[in-house]
Image (cartoon, rainbow, N blue to C red):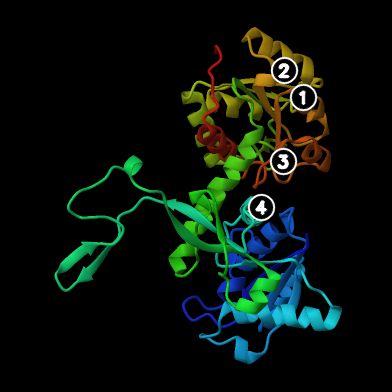
Amino acid sequence: MESLAIIPARGGSKGIPRKNVAMLLDKPLIAHTIQAARDAARVTRVVVSTDDPEIAQVSRAYGAEVVMRPDELAGDMARSEDALLHVLERLAVAEGYAPDLVVFLQCTSPLTSAEDIDGTIASLIEQGADTAHSVIPFHYFLWREGAGGADGINHDKSFRLMRQQREPEYLETGSVYVMRTEGFLNARFRFFGRTAMNAIPVDHWQEIDEPVDFQIAAERMARLRRRDRSAGLPRPLRALVMDFDGVHTDDRVLVSTSGEEAVACSRADGMGIELLRKAGLAMTVISKERNAVVAARCAKLQIDCTHGVEDKLPLMLAWLAQRGVTPAEAIYVGNDINDLACMAAVGCAVAPADAHPAALAQAGIVLSVGGGKGALRELAEMILDAGVLSAAPA
């Protein structure tokens, strides 16, 4: 079944100027929706409708096709449906293209996932519906002001039913709509005929209308990313083994005129290690580096350390066995080729963002920042958020 995803994106945004191309974490706002559409298994084509050259350029850079719309379809009062109809008309005339389904996506809902899109399409198909949209469960009491004072909209104010006693209600998210193309061309509106609903996670509901919404979306998106990546963590997790250079440090060495060496470490990483230590996680550093700075740093962090080690794997396996921990219950954090054997042996291999390509390829989890720049703090928060810890004997 041919499903065309269309993402309308005007250039003129009065509430937040240039909103659709403003950065949200690591990419422009519109790019998040484009990526979700491209990742959706049931979407066969992704088109952005815009009047703005910069939005067009960004959209193409992230893999979407672009249909430029005329000025009369780009004003404040322009309907999204008119932009969708314009795209369908342009593609029909230029290519004879007629998709079975139109998937209308809002780029101001950046937490929309590929699963949300696929699920909404599936709801339409499986229920034999004409239209479908994404929703979230709604359990709140609505009120309105009337001539006789405030009164309930979805409830009788004279008594309060418990949640379990109420009929389920759902809130339209405004993020995903699916329509059968033929019916949409006739109705020229997003809802017609039989309508299906697809309930998505509440964490995915976020509209960008005010400047503060960017901050809220960024925090929620970062948390969702940590949760998704934490799926690869051992369950239970009983031990953490780490390289030193390139993990606790930024892999540089500072040499004084007298030949003394120093390294740069992150205080944020130190706090992450402290949080894990207090949570009862057994930790050790195994390093090839012979400089005493390794032992000094680990002593300050109050964790085990062995340095000057050429072949790390036997030592790691012995350390785990002494604590009754299987390799499958451990994480190894490494950044270079001498870490590969240990990374392959444990339940989860982790690499900082700036690790050697071979280490990145071996890693089950690649952190978003580099070694010595908060990578271990990021990992610590991921572990604690996931609730996978099971303490091993120290």
The image's mark for residue 316 is 2
Q: Are marks 3 and 4 in contact (CB under 8 Å)?
A: no
Which residue has dot 3 on it?
251
Q: Secondary structure at mark 3?
A: loop
Which residue has dot 1 on it?
342
Q: Residue at x 71, y 55 (%)?
A: 40
Q: Are marks 3 and 2 in contact (CB under 8 Å)?
A: no
Q: Are marks 2 and 1 in contact (CB under 8 Å)?
A: yes
**Is residue 338 or residue 191 the one in the foreground?**
191
Upstream in sequence: badge 3 or badge 1: 3
The image's mark for residue 122 is 4
Picture quadrant of residue 291: top right
Q: What amino acid is at disc 3? A: Asp
Q: What amino acid is at disc 4? A: Ala
Q: What amino acid is at disc 2? A: Met
Q: Position of residue 16 (x, y in %)?
A: 49, 75
